[in-house]
Image (cartoon, grey):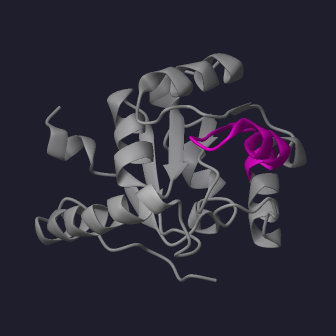
Amino acid sequence: MSMLMLMVPDEYVTDVTQIEPKDLEHRGIDAVICDVDNTLVPYGSEEIPSDTLSWFGSLREQGLKIALVSNALSRRVTRVACMLDVPAVPQANKPRRGGYRRALDMLQAEPERTAVIGDQLFTDVIGGNRLGMYTVLVVPLTGNDFVGTRIVRFVERLVLSYLTRRGLTKAPSGRKQ
């Protein structure tokens, strides 16, 4: 797979609540790996929005297995995982494959039956695509980010614009709530 194609998400949505658990199941997905910062909670926060909590409930109702994989520090990621009652792999060094493989092992899941959901092309999408997982890019919850991530976001916007112009991805579907 070319480096360009590694950056192409299978789906691009405004936020996690736009992802229908039944649609994932119809795609043969039985496990979900989620990023934490600016995907599930605002950067640096541990407060999970109520609509995100409801969405997690619908994933469970659909019978999907769920884990968190984040590059963030262990203590905060672990607290968010405890609130959601799911396993977590903090300090995962995404887009490296090791964190994703640990999560797959925890869930006893196969990559081709797993979706990766996150807000960054260069960590979440590339990492998931490298293992053959279904990748869903979400618009970041806030503009607040780790300083290094702010720089990367500028480059990601350029790449997303290029991918959209080439017809390799579409603008995010759904409305920001």
For the question of whether residue 27 can be seen, the reply is yes
Q: Is residue 76 magenta?
A: yes
Residue 23: image x %, image y %? Answer: 55, 53
For the question of whether residue 10 can be seen, the reply is no
At x 36%, y 53%, the residue is 121
Q: With respect to residue 87, does 138 lie above or below?
A: below
Left-right relation of 71 to 10: right
**Residue range highlighted in magenta:** 59-80
Q: With respect to residue 63, does 141 lie above or below?
A: below
Q: With respect to residue 90, does 24 lie above or below?
A: below
Q: Is residue 83 magenta?
A: no
Left-right relation of 104 to 81: left
Q: Quadrant of residue 39?
A: bottom right
At x 62%, y 44%, the residue is 72
Which of the pair 175/36 is nearer the observer?
A: 36
Residue 95: image x %, image y %? Answer: 41, 35
Q: With respect to residue 39, does 108 lie above or below?
A: above
At x 53%, y 27%, the residue is 100
Q: Quadrant of residue 91?
A: top right
- The image quadrant where one finds the C terminus is bottom right
Residue 4: image x %, image y %? Answer: 16, 46
Q: Residue furthest front?
A: 147
Left-right relation of 141 to 52: left
- The image quadrant where one finds the N terminus is top left
Q: Quadrant of residue 25?
A: top right
At x 57%, y 68%, the residue is 15
Residue 124: image x %, image y %? Answer: 45, 45
Q: How many marks?
A: 0
Which of the pair 132/45 is nearer the observer?
A: 45
